[in-house]
Image (cartoon, helix red, strand yellow):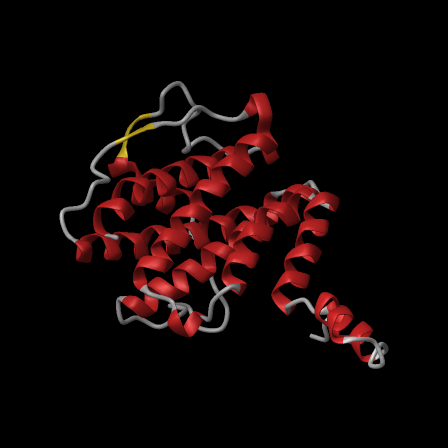
């Protein structure tokens, strides 16, 4: 990507060194300013700006497990905040969870891999039923991040990046509930996730329950192991 300030500098070659120095900015600085502008124009973009800018500051080649899990934790916390804000007063209360604290880094990584792949399948299950285009775009922006998490964790545990090959598959609502129910102590007054998902509010609240679960899981375990 050509830096706009570098273009300006080439047009001012006869200027003094001091002018040229002031004209120079890094590609990263330009990208961050552009991303910040995008955040003003659309709420969906704001969800990804900080994540994208943070990732741009280092090469994925040098990404450590600690960096990755702290980034995943930050993403899941952001997903919770985003869905709560989008739902407003219709947002479900946070359930009370159990058995999320892991006793070894291996068990933590393995359960992370399960949760992230369930998240991908859940958003794929829900997407066709979302009627509002804005809600669908928001769900899609979260889905792609969940898929990045899942691919990383699949590789970390020695599995293919995609267990379903080139075309991923949704997971049924009943299977999702079966996967996460062992970790739910009580719903704290929220709706039963086994109920039919009749509209966008039901679907986003179903997603919020899963994001609450993932966020608390990482909030408990990432500081412990990384």
What residue is rendered at 72% in x and 75% in y?
2
What residue is rendered at 59% in x and 25% in y?
88
Of the pair 166 and 28, the residue shown nearer to us: 28
Please determine whether, in this image, residue 9 is positioned above or below residue 143: below
Would you identify the image quadrant in which residue 182 lies?
top left
Q: Position of residue 30 (x, y in %)?
A: 68, 62
- Tell me: 122 left or right of 82: left
Q: Position of residue 93 (x, y in %)?
A: 44, 23
Q: Position of residue 54 (x, y in %)?
A: 51, 57
What residue is rendered at 38% in x and 65% in y?
152
Q: Residue furthest left?
A: 103
Residue 75 at least partly seen:
yes
- Tell me: 153 left or right of 8: left
Please determine whether, in this image, residue 65 is positioned above or below residue 124: below
Residue 203 at least partly seen:
no
Please determine whether, in this image, residue 37 is positioned above or below residue 96: below
Of the pair 135 and 84, the residue shown nearer to us: 84
Q: Position of residue 69 (x, y in %)?
A: 34, 55
Q: Residue furthest top?
A: 189
């Amino acid at each position: 990507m050509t830096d706009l300030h570098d273009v300006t500098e080439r047009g001012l070659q006869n200027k003094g060194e001091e002018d040229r120095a002031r004209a120079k900015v890094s590609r990263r600085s330009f990208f961050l300013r552009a991303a910040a502008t995008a955040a003003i124009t659309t709420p969906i973009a704001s969800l990804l700006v900080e994540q994208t800018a943070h990732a741009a500051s280092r090469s994925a080649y040098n990404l450590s497990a600690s960096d990755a899990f702290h980034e995943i934790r930050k993403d899941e916390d952001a997903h919770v905040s985003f869905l709560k804000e989008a739902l407003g007063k219709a947002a479900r209360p946070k359930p009370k969870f159990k058995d999320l604290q892991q006793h070894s880094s291996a068990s933590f990584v393995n359960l992370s891999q399960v949760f992230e792949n369930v998240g991908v399948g859940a958003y794929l299950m829900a997407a066709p039923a979302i009627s509002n285009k804005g809600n669908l775009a928001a769900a899609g922006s979260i889905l792609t991040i969940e898929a990045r998490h899942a691919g990383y964790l699949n590789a970390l545990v020695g599995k293919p990046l995609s267990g379903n090959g080139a075309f991923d598959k949704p997971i049924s609502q009943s299977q999702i509930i079966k996967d996460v129910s062992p970790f739910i102590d009580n719903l704290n007054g929220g709706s039963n996730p086994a109920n039919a998902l009749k509209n966008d509010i039901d679907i986003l609240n179903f997603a919020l329950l899963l994001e609450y679960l993932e966020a608390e899981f990482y909030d408990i375990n990432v500081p412990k192991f990384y």
